[in-house]
Image (tube, rainbow, N blue to C red):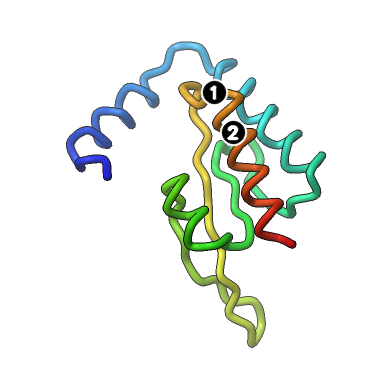
């Protein structure tokens, strides 16, 4: 568990990142991974937030994913989201996508 103060400082560091291309690089990498592995998702244009069907509790805990319910018509759908920052490594993002794909099966 990340203490709230540490999380706050981490977010401050990331939002003060001077090169927006570092965000784009990781966002593009993560988006391509999700697409190539067939994991459905959506995100707003120019956003670093990816929303997908909620995976297993184990995957949520391992990758510290935030889960929520979304209403679509009369259906309530369990969703989760990941926020991609420049500090995320390709290995970490690849492991997340592999876990999401495994949870789809």
Where, by quadrant of the figure, is residue 12 drawn?
top left
* Residue contact between numbered discs 1 and 2, judged by CB atoms under 8 Å: yes
Which residue is labeled 2 in the image? 93
Residue at 44%, 12% in the rendered image = 18
- Label 1: state its secondary structure: loop
For the residues labelled 1 and 2, the Cα–Cα distance comes to 6 Å
Q: Is residue 62 left or right of residue 73?
A: left
Task: Pinpoint residue 101: horizontal percent, then vertical percent.
Answer: 71, 51
Please say if 92 is above or below 79. above
Report the quarter where the N terminus lies. Answer: top left
Q: Is residue 8 left or right of residue 85?
A: left
Residue at 17%, 36% in the rendered image = 5
Report the quarter where the C terminus lies. Answer: bottom right
Task: Pinpoint residue 96: horizontal percent, then vertical percent.
Answer: 59, 42
For this rendering, which residue is in front, 76 or 60? 60
Tell me if mark 2 has few (under 14), some (14-19) or many (20+) residues whose alpha carbon lies within 10 angstroms of its own: many
Tell me if mark 1 has few (under 14), some (14-19) or many (20+) residues whose alpha carbon lies within 10 angstroms of its own: few
Residue closest to the far bottom: 74
Tag of residue 14 = none
For this rendering, which residue is in front, 93 or 16? 93
Residue at 56%, 70% in the rendered image = 78
How many numbered marks, from 0 up?
2
Where, by quadrant of the figure, is residue 103 drawn?
bottom right
Task: Pinpoint residue 23: horizontal percent, then vertical percent.
Answer: 55, 23
Please say if 64 is above or below 54. above
Residue at 20%, 42% in the rendered image = 4
Where, by quadrant of the figure, is residue 76 drawn?
bottom right
Residue closest to the far top: 18
- Label 2: state its secondary structure: helix
Which residue is labeled 1 in the image? 89
Q: Is residue 33 left or right of residue 63?
A: right
């Amino acid at each position: 568990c990340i203490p709230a103060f540490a999380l706050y400082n981490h977010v401050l560091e990331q939002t003060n990142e001077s090169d927006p291309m570092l965000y784009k690089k990781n966002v593009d990498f993560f988006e391509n991974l999700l697409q190539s592995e067939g994991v459905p998702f959506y995100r707003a244009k120019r956003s670093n937030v990816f929303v997908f069907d909620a995976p297993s509790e184990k995957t949520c805990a391992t990758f510290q994913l935030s889960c929520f319910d979304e209403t679509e018509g009369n259906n309530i759908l369990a969703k989760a989201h990941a926020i991609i920052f420049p500090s995320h490594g390709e290995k970490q993002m690849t492991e997340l996508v592999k876990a999401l794909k495994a949870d789809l099966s």
